[in-house]
Each structure stands twice: as C-alpha cells, then as structure tokens.
Image (cartoon, rainbow, N blue to C red):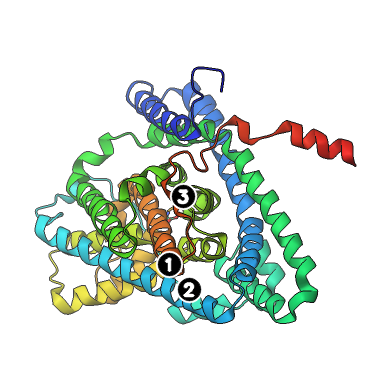
Amino acid sequence: MSEAKKMSLTVKVLLGLVLGLITGVLINTFLAGNAFVDTWLTNGVFHMVGKMFVNALKMLVVPLVTFSLICGVCGIGDIKALGRIGTKSFGLYVLTTAIAISTAILLATIIGPGKGFKMDTVETKDVVAKEAPPVTQVFIDIIPSNPIKAFAEGEMLSIIFYAIMFGVSILLVGARARPIVDAAEMLNEVAMKMVTLVMSIAHIGVFCLIAKTFAQQGIGLLLPMASYFFTVVGALAIHLFVTLLALLFVFTRLSPMTFMKKMRNAQAFAFSTASSSATLPITLRSVSERLGVNNSVASFTVPLGATINMDGTAIMQGVATVFIANVYGIELGLGGYLTVIGMSVLASIGTAGVPGVGLIMLAMVLNQVGLPLEGIGIIMGVDRLLDMCRTAVNITGDAMVSTVVAKGENKIDYDVYRDPEAGVLDADDIHITDAEKLAHAS
Ligand code: ASP
C-alpha cells in the first residue's frame, strides 16, 4: 500500500456517522424551519441518497440469503447436523431474548422511569395500533403457499424455509445435482461481491441517513423522556457488553474484544438504517469473513436471527411496559411481568427486522397485560433514536449466537477470527483487472 495507510471502510463509516450526527444536530438547532435547508437538504439530498442506499442494501437481501442458504445446507451435507444447528440456534435465540427482557424489566423496576411523570410535558401522538398478527398466523405463514410471492415480497421466514427445503432436496438427489450446487456457490460469490460494491459507498449513505434523522428529531426531544430513554439505553448496554459478551466467552473462550471490533461495521449499519433486515448482507459478511464462521452455519443462523431474534426490541418492550404501567399507576405484579416476558419473546419472533415494528408489536404485549395502548403515543417521539440503538443490539445478538453455534459444530476458522485484518474492506477489494480478464476471455 503506497499511500499513508488507506482508510478502512469501518473508519469511513464511523466518520460518516459522527459527521452526520453533528450536521443533523446543527441543522436542527440553528436552521430549524429554514425552508431551503428543509426542502433541499433534509428532505432533498439526505432523504434521497439515504433511501437509495437503504434500497441498495435491501436489494441484496433476498438473492444473498437464498444462494447462501442453499450453499450452506449443501455445505453441512448432513440433514441430522442441519436439525442440530437449527435447534441450537433457535434455543439460543429464545434464551438470549428472555435474558434481555428480564434485564430490562429488572433495571426498569429499580430505576422506575415514569413515576411522577407529567403527561403535559411531552407531545402525545395518536396511536394507530395496528393489529399484531396472532402467533399462530406467524407459524402458518412460514410455509409459503406461493414461493414466488414469498420471494417477491421478501418474506424472510418463508424464504428461509423454501431455501432449506431446496437445499435438503439437492442433498437427497445426490451427485447428479452437483451442477446446481456449483451454480449456487458461484451465484453466492457474485452476490457477496455486490455487497462489497454497495459497501464501498456506505459512508455517504450512512452520513445522509443520520444527518436526516437528527435534523428532524434533534436531541431536545429527549429531555422530558430522559428517564425512559436512558433506562432503555442502559439495559441495551448491559445486554450488549455484559450478557452477550459473557455468553460468547463462556461458550467459546474467544476474545470478546475481537468480536466487538469485528462487528463494529455491521453495528454502524444497523444504527444508521434501524433495520436488521437491511443490515443482513453486512452482518452475514462480518460473521463469515471477519469472524471466520463457516458459511454452512452463518448462512443459516444469521438470516434466521435477523428475522426472529430481537434482543434489543424485547428490551425496549420490557422498559416500555414498566414505564407505561408507572405513568398510568397500574400495578403489574409478578404474573404480569412473567406474561410480559413470554409475550415479548413471541413478539420478537414475529417482529420483522424493519424500522419501527417493535413499537407496533408492543401493542400486543400491552394488550395481553391490560395496559392502555395510548401509552405507545407517549414513547413514540423518542422511538426512532431507540430503534437505531436496539437494532445494533439485535444484530450483535445474531452474530454472537452464530459464533457460538459454529464453535459447537467446529465450523469456525480461528485464524480468521484472530486476524485483525481478515475480511477488512478497502478499495482493493474491487479488482478491475479481474473484470477485464473476464471480458477479454469471452
Ligand atoms: N428496527 C428493529 C430491527 O430491525 C425492529 C424494531 O425493534 O422495530 O431489528
């Protein structure tokens, strides 16, 4: 490398994030209401580029998950092992979510956010409490009656189900299906290359997304809701830095520091997009190429986690329930809290990894314990910022479980895990010369 050390993508993305935050807060503080800035910057360039970037990420999800899952299932090569990996990851996902929500309720009970809360200091928004889908429907919908529709609409659980069935059938057909495996492997490589391409402009996308959010939200909004906001952030921090890292260390003996460093990029994406689903290509890349988890495990556990594992969301729901109960002066009692834990775990499975759904699913939890849905209107104002934070925790949980499962299956490359440079992206990852060779060869 000739120039004075190239800036790695992670540094660029973090820089985009910080600069976006500063720009957004400055606009919100000094230029609020300025029609030009509002039309041309916040709702103009920032909105457009940010949306284009998120669309580019979403565009990658369905093909990447499909090809990588087919390769993954064929890579495991053994249906029994597949069942074991599935059971282990599902069990760990449920366990971590249950721990997350318990931490949240405990912390919220100690801090007591919402006690003595003055309703008139915040703007209460009207809640459009959408009907949360019944749990039975979530399970029914896993099996797509029309796979093309499932793929077209990006229904992750159905896609995962279909791709696994497809992979298993390839295994059952045996040697004659080898060309399909080869094709899926090649397509997977191409899909991964597309991730690299989109990531090369990530810092710009992240800057625009963050600048727009903070220009519109500001941080003044936080003050009346500070106790709720910081209780959620506190519980998220405990879950991220204590629970997840401790579980990682206990189960794998791998360095939590290395894990966190290698997940930084994906966390920044999750924070900027507030969508586990849009971040999925980056999480998958970080887990397989940075942490060294074999694709046969990662391709299965990461998309599954992005869809059913929402530790951060469960934490928000736990604190929100205690907060709303406090605001309305309602005692929940032990039975109530246990119901909240159960419901939040189920809600987390049924929550799609897109911005803001956690709040809608909260309606289901509140309903179950008889708390007023209007409570959601109170916390709505600060939800976007919390959504960003909890999504970063959601995807870190997915990566942790994936690493633990891979370790148990002996499907982790320790050299890759320990190598700080492994899978780091810089401009050199796009080899124009290779492309030229291919063009000339044809
Ligand atoms: N935005 C979250 C995610 O994508 C879900 C939520 O809590 O609303 O993981």
Mark 3 crowdedness (10 Å alpha carbons): few <14, some 14-19, many ≥20: few
Q: Which of the two residues, 235 or 432, is positioned nearer the viewer here?
A: 432
Say left or right for 414 vs 169.
Answer: left
Q: How much space separates mark 2 and mark 1, taking CA atoms?
A: 7 Å
Quadrant assignment for the C terminus:
top right
Residue 405: assigned label: 1
Q: Is residue 128 visible?
A: no
Q: How much space separates mark 3 and mark 1, taking CA atoms?
A: 18 Å
Viewer-nearest of discs 2 and 3: 3
Q: Which image quadrant is residue 201 in?
A: top right
Q: Which residue is mark 2?
A: 85
Q: Label 3 is placed on what type of residue?
A: Asp
Give the quadrant of ligand 1. bottom left
Q: Is residue 66 visible?
A: yes
Across and down, in percent, residue 120 comes to 19, 47
Q: How much space separates mark 2 and mark 3, taking CA atoms?
A: 23 Å
Viewer-nearest of discs 3 and 1: 3
**Secondary structure under badge 2?**
helix
Residue located at (72% from left, 61% from top): 184
Across and down, in percent, residue 92 comes to 37, 70
Across and down, in percent, residue 80 comes to 54, 82
Quadrant assignment for the N terminus:
top right
